[in-house]
Amino acid sequence: QVQLVESGGGLVQPGGSLRLSCAASGSIFRVNAMAWYRQAPGKERELVAIIVSGGRTNYADSVKGRFTISRDNAKNTVYLQMNSLKPEDTAVYYCNGEITSVARTISVYWGQGTQVTVSS
């Protein structure tokens, strides 16, 4: 079994910064792609940023230049550094991972979500 555990959410003023972390644990052979999604009240869940095993990244247009996704392969952990936060970034942020288990099965896992609120 594989688990994704997020941390780092909270309340921040507009223009501020937060860093989210997501650690994968369990029967992991390899972590393939990892991503961050977010869901604001009344809206659908959307992809924020993704990083694949080779390190290539992609971002939603709304966060380009402000957010940076990175990963520590040794720790099976992905980070989302969020700078210049805006009220419209307020959402529950979810970690997502495509992981190959020790049994060599590939599955997609979700974290429990962490609240990010940008408000003065």
Image (cartoon, rainbow, N blue to C red):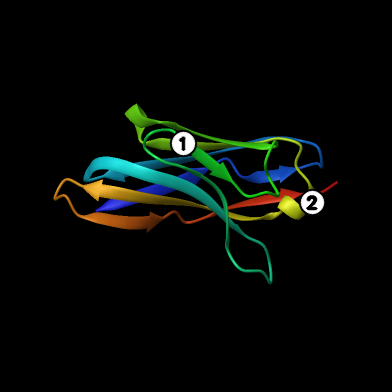
Badge 1: residue crowd in 10 Å (few <14, some 14–19, many ≥20)? few
* Residue type marked 2: Pro
Looking at the rendered structure, the kind of residue marked 1 is: Arg
In the depicted structure, whether residue 46 falls above or below residue 15: below
**Mark number for residue 46?**
none
| Residue pictured at 37% horizontal, 56% vertical | 109
Which residue shows up at 79% across the image and 51% down it? 87
Closer to the camera, 108 or 92? 108
Q: Residue at x 16, y 50 (%)?
A: 104
The local secondary structure at tag 2 comes to helix
The residue most toward the left is 103
Question: Residue 112: x, y in percent?
Answer: 47, 56
Q: In this image, 27 relative to 8: left or right?
A: left
Left or right of residue 85, residue 111 in this image: left
Quadrant position of residue 19: top right
Q: Left or right of 51: which side holds 76?
A: left
What x and y, as percent, mark residue 11?
A: 72, 45
Q: What's the CA distance linking mark 1 and mark 2?
A: 28 Å
Dot 1 or dot 2, earlier in sequence:
1
114 or 89: nearer the viewer: 89
Which residue was labeled with disc 2?
A: 87
Residue position marked by numbered label 1 in the rendering = 56
| For residue 44, side relative to residue 16 (left or right) | left
